[in-house]
Amino acid sequence: MSETPNASRNRKDAQLDQFRVDDAGQKLTTNQGLKVSEDEFSLKIGERGPTLLEDFHFREKMTHFDHERIPERIVHARGFAAHGEFQVYDDSMKAYTKAKFLIDPSRLTPTFVRFSTVAGSRGSAETVRDARGFATKFYTEEGNYDLVGNNIPVFFIQDAIKFPDLVHALKPEPHHEMPQAASAHDTFWDFVANNQESAHMVMWAMSDRAIPRSFRMMEGFGVHTFRLINEQGQAHFVKFHWKPVLGVHSLVWDEAQKISGKDPDFHRRDLWESIETGNYPVYELGVQLLPEEDEFKFDFDILDPTKLWPEEDVPVKRIGKMTLNRNVDNVFAETEQVAFHPGHVVPGIDFSNDPLLQGRLFSYTDTQLIRLGGPNFHELPINRPVCPFFNNQRDGYGRQTINRGQVAYHKNSLAGNTPAPASEAEGGYAHYQERVEGHKIRARSESFKDHFSQAALFWNSMSPPEKQHIIDAFSFELGKVQSKSVRQQVVDMFANVNVELAAAFAANIGAQQPQPVAPIEERTKVSPALSQLNTAMLPDTRKVGVLIGGGFDGLEVQTVLHELAAAGIQAELISDKLGKAAGTGGVEMEIKHTFQTAHAVLFDALYAAGGSWTSPKAEKDAAEFLREAFMHYKTIGASGAGAELFPAAGIEGGPGVLTGGGHLTAFVPAFIEAIAKHRNWDRVLA
Ligand code: HDE
C-alpha cells in the first residue's frame, strides 16, 4: 500500500471501521450465525424439569460469559482512553530526527491515548493520590510509536530490577488487601525510607500533581532520556513532554477524597463529556534536546530517571500538537486491549542506557502475553499498525491473519528470499551504534547517588500554598502509617530535602524532630516551571454549579449564564428537585442536578442565582454547597439575591467571593476572571 501522507487522515478510524458492529435491529444468533428462537428459557425436560446438556445455545452463552474477564494490568489497571490526531508545526525537527511523523507538517498521525492511575484496581476511584499514566500510541506510516509516559517527570527507582519490590510495597498489603488505590500505608513508606532514590518522585507524589483536576489539565512526560537520530545518523538526547493548553491544575485533597465517593468516575466522565461536547483536549508535544557531547555537563547523570532537566536550563521546544477528538466505541475492545510498549519505536527514535528504560523494554511485551493471552495481540484492531506488516511469525492463540504460501522462514529461495529486510534507505530500523565497553557487574554508577538535590529543587520551586499542601500530604500519609519507626525514618530522610518540611510534618505525626543532617551545600536553585502557579489560567471548559430556587431573577440569571457560555464556561443548574425552575419575567430553566445527586466538589465554581427555597432543608443544602466550595478555595459568585445564602454558609466575603449588587457589567467579567484563576489561595479560612 503506497499512500500519500495525508491519506493517514483518519486512517486508523477507517481501519477500525472494518471491525465495528452495530447489533441494533438485527436478529439474535449464536456465534455460528444460527438464528435463536428463545433466549430466556433454557432447554429442559418439562417445564419444571432439569436442563439438558444438549442446549448448545445456553452452553455457548454461558461459556462466553464465564470467560469474559482478562487479568487486569498489574499497574495502571484503571484507565480511560480516547482517539486523537497529532501534527507537527513545521519541519524544524529535521535537524534532530528522521522520524517522518515528527518532521512532516502535512502529515496527520492518528493517536490513541490511555490515561490511568497506577496503584488501584480496575474498579477503583479516580481522584486518589497517585501518579497518572499518559500513554500515547502514534499510528505512523512507519509503524506504531508508543510514548508510554506519566504525569510526573521522574520515577521512584533507578533500576528496573527494583520495580516488583516497589509495586509490592505500593499495592494493598497482602495479608488483608488494604488499602485500595492508596500509598498511605506502612509498606509503601517503609520502601521509601529504605530506598532513598525515591525522594524526588515522592515529593511530586505528595504535591498537587498527584491529584489532577482533569486528564485535560495535566502534563505528560516520557521520563527517560531517549535518543533522536537524524538522516545523517547524528544523535541527540531527548526528553519528551506533553503540555496541556488548559494549563496544569489540581484538586485539593479533601475535595479529591470526597469526589472518590460522590463520583468515582470523575476523570473519565470529564474526558468523555469534553469530547462529546466538542471541547477537545489539546496537548503540545515538547522536546528538550541535548547534543551527545553535553552528556556530562550536568550535576546529575542524564541516564538517571530520578532526575529531570530543569526547563530553564534546557528549554522545551514545542514541536506539534495532539487533539483528542473521538471517544472509544467499546472500552474493553479498545482501552482494555490496547498494548503499549516503550520499545515500539520508529526510525529516528532510539533508546538510552537508562537502566529503568532498559528493563521496561523487556516487561511490556511479557505482560501483554499473560494479559491478552498469547503472542497475537498485535492483531487486535486497536493495536494494528496502519501500515502493512509482514514477517515469518506464525500461529499462536487467536491467530487471525491467514498467511498464504509455502514459505515461513528466512532466508529462503522459494519466495525469492522475501519478506526481506529493508535497508536503512528503504526505511529499515537501524539501532544507533553507540560504542559501549565495560565489565559485567551488578552495580550502580556513583553519578546516580545524589538523591536529594532535585527533591530540594522541587520543594524550593513551590509557592507557599503548594508547600503547605505537601506538608499536609506527608502528614496525612504518615498519619496512616502504624509503625512509629517507619514514620521516624521518613522524617529523618526528608530532612535531607528540607529541614523545615520534615520538621513541619514530624510535628503532625507524633515523630521526633528530624536529626540534624550533615551540612549540605546551600540549595537555592529554583525552577519556576515546576510551580502550578505559573501555568495557563483559562476559563475554558470550567464547570460552574448554579444554585437556583423558584422565582429567581429571570433576566439577570439568563444574562449571566449567557456570558459564562460565551467564555466557554459550562453552567449546570442545581436545585432541590428536578424539573423546571420558574423565574421572573416568564423565564424557565431546566434543573440538571438535585442537592442529593450533585455535590459542590464536582464543580470548579458556584453561582448562587437566588430564588426562594421550598423548604428550610433545601436552603440549608444550598448553603452547604457554598460552604464546601468556599473551603476548597473556589470562586463563588452571587449576582443578586443569591448572596442571601452567604450568612448560613458562614461566608463573609474575601478573595474570590463576588457579588453583583445589581451591576452585572462589572460582576460578570470579574466572575469569569476569578474562575479562570482556578483557586483563591489567598483566601483565609475560618
Ligand atoms: Fe510501566 N508498566 N513499568 N512505567 N507503565 C506497565 O504494562 C514497568 C514505568 C507506564 O495505559 C505494564 O501493559 C516496569 C515508568 C504506563 O496500558 C508493565 C517499569 C513509566 C503504563 C509495566 C515501569 C511507566 C504502564 C503493566 C520499571 C513512565 C500503562 C501493564 C522498569 C515513563 C500503559 C502493561 C497503559 C504499564 C512495567 C516503570 C508508565 C507491567 C518494569 C518509569 C503509562 O509492563
Image (cartoon, rainbow, N blue to C red):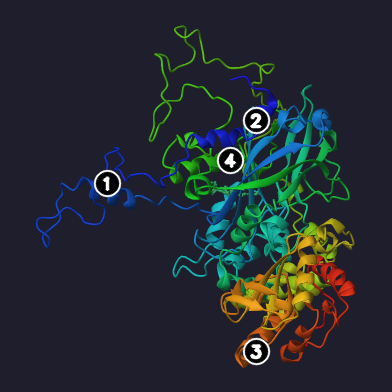
In the figure, is residue 278 to the left or right of 29?
A: right
Q: Give the mark, 3 or 2, whose residue is nearer the N terminus.
A: 2
**SS for dot 4:** loop
Judged from the image, the secondary structure of the residue bearing numbered disc 1 is helix
The residue positioned 71% from the left and 25% from the top of the image is 433
* Residue corresponding to mark 4: 341
Label pair 4/1, CB-CB below 8 angstroms: no
Q: Residue at x 61, y 71 (%)?
A: 592
Which residue is labeled 1 in the image? 60
Q: Nearer the viewer, mark 3 or mark 1?
A: 3
Which is more toward the observer, 358 or 125? 125
Q: Is residue 546 above or below residue 129?
A: below
- Residue type, label 4: His
Circle 3 packing at 10 Å, graded few (<14), some (14-19), many (20+), is some
C-alpha gap between disc 3 and disc 2: 56 Å
Whether the residue carrying mark 4 lies under 8 Å from ligand 1 is answered with: yes
Pointer 3 with pointer 1, Cβ within 8 A: no
**Measured Cα–Cα span from mark 4 to mark 2:** 22 Å
Disc number placed over residue 620 in the picture, else none: 3
The answer to whether marks 1 and 2 mark residues whose Cβ atoms lie closer than 8 Å is: no
Residue picked out by circle 2:
8
For residue 423, which quarter of the picture? Answer: top right
Give how far across and how far down residue 88 sits, in percent: 77, 36
Q: Position of residue 486 (x, y in %)?
A: 62, 72
- Asked if residue 5 is positioned above or below residue 678 in the image, the reply reads above
> Residue at 66% across / 33% down in the picture?
9
